[in-house]
Amino acid sequence: MRDSLSIFKDQLEIAFYAFALLILVGFVLDITSSFTIPFVMAIILYLLSSPFIDRLESKKIPHWAALLLVGLITAGVVTLLGLLAYSSVEMLAQGLPKYQHRYQQIISFFTQISKKYPMLKLEEIPSSLNLTDLSSFILSTMGSFVKFLTGLTLMFLFFAFMLVGKGNFEKKLNKLYDGAKGDRVKRITREVEEKVYKYLWTKTLISLITGFNTWLILLLFGVDFAFVWGFLTFVFNYIPNVGPIFITIPPLLIALLKFGKLLPVIFLLLFLALNHMVMGNFVEPRWMGKTLNLSPLLVLFSLIFWGWLWGVMGMLLSVPLLSIIKIVLESFPETEKLARLMES
C-alpha cells in the first residue's frame, strides 16, 4: 500500500513539474514570439532547402555558389508568398463592407421565416453584425506592413546564418564522433533530414494542388475573391481536419451573400468537400507513403497550445512541428518508444 502511494506521489510530482515547465516555456515563447516565430520558420526553410544544396554540390558546384543560389531562390519564393498572403487578406478585408446590404436582406428573409416557423430559432442569427467593423478587426489583427516586413527580414537573417553554418555543423560532427559511432550519428542525421524534407515537400505540394483546385472551383462558380480563398486554402491545408473545414466556410458565406440563393451554395459545398476529401483521404496517403499516424488528441492539443501562443501562425506551424519532433524521436532507438506514444 505504501509503495503504491509512494509511486502515485512520484507520478503526481512529475506531472506537476511537467505542467509547470510547460507553462514556463509557453510564457517565454509568448513574450519572445517576435523572434521565435521567424526562427522556427527559418528552421523549416532550412530543412526544405538543405537537400538542394547537397544535390548542387554533388554536381561539382562550389559550396558557396550552391548556398547563394538556393538562398536567393528560397528568399524570392518566400517573399512572394508572404506578400501574396498579406495582400490577399487585406484585399478580402477591404471588400467585405460591400456585402452589408445583401447581409441585411438575408437576415430579413430569415426573420420572416422564423415568424412562420418559430421552432427553427432562426432569430438567433446575429442581425447587428457590421461587416465594416469586421473588416477593421481583420486589418488590425494583421498588424502593420512594416511589422510584417520586419518579421520576414528577421526570418531571412536566421535562415542565412543556418545556411552558412551548414558545412561547419558537419565538420563539428566529424570532430565529436569518429569511427562506427560517427557513421551512426551521420546516418541518423541524414535520415531525419530526408524524412522531414519528404514530409514538408509532399504536404506543400498537396496543399498547393488543393488550393489551385479550390481557386478553379470558385472561379467557375463566379465567387468573389476566388484567388484569395484558393491561396488561403493552400495555407490552412497545413492544419489537418480543422484547417480545411475552417477555410471552406467563408467562401460559402460570400457565395450566399452574392447569390442570395441556397442551391448554388449547396453545389459549391459539394465540390469543395469533394476536393478536400480526394486530396486528403486518397492522394495524400499515397504520396506520403508511410503515414506519421499522429494521435488526433495530440494534434488537437498541439493546435490549441500553439494557437494560444502564436495565434493563426502557431496553428499553421503546430502540426509540422509535431511531425518533425516525431520523426526525430523515432530515428533514435533511445527515444523510439516516445514516438510510439505519439501515435493513435
Image: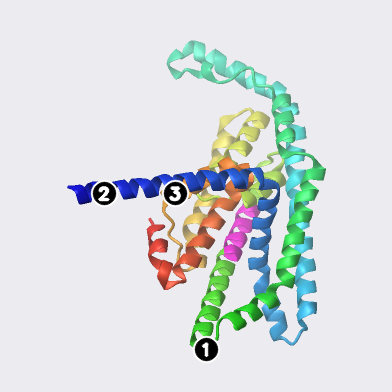
Q: Nearer the viewer, mark 2 or mark 3?
A: 2
Q: CA distance from mark 2 to mark 3?
A: 18 Å
Q: Which residues are magenta?
A: 200-213
Q: State the quadrant of the C terminus.
A: bottom left
Dot label at residue 6: 2
Work out whether 328 lies above or below 213. Answer: below
Q: Relative to the observer, which residue lies in front, 318 or 135?
A: 318
State the residue position of label 3. Answer: 18
What element does badge 1 sit on? helix
State the residue position of label 1. Answer: 179
Among numbered discs 2 and 3, the one appearing first in the sequence? 2
Among numbered discs 1 and 2, the one appearing first in the sequence? 2
Does the stretch in magenta take in 234? no
Q: Residue at x 70, y 51 (%)?
A: 35
Q: Nearer the viewer, mark 1 or mark 2?
A: 2
Q: Residue at x 48, y 68 (%)?
A: 289
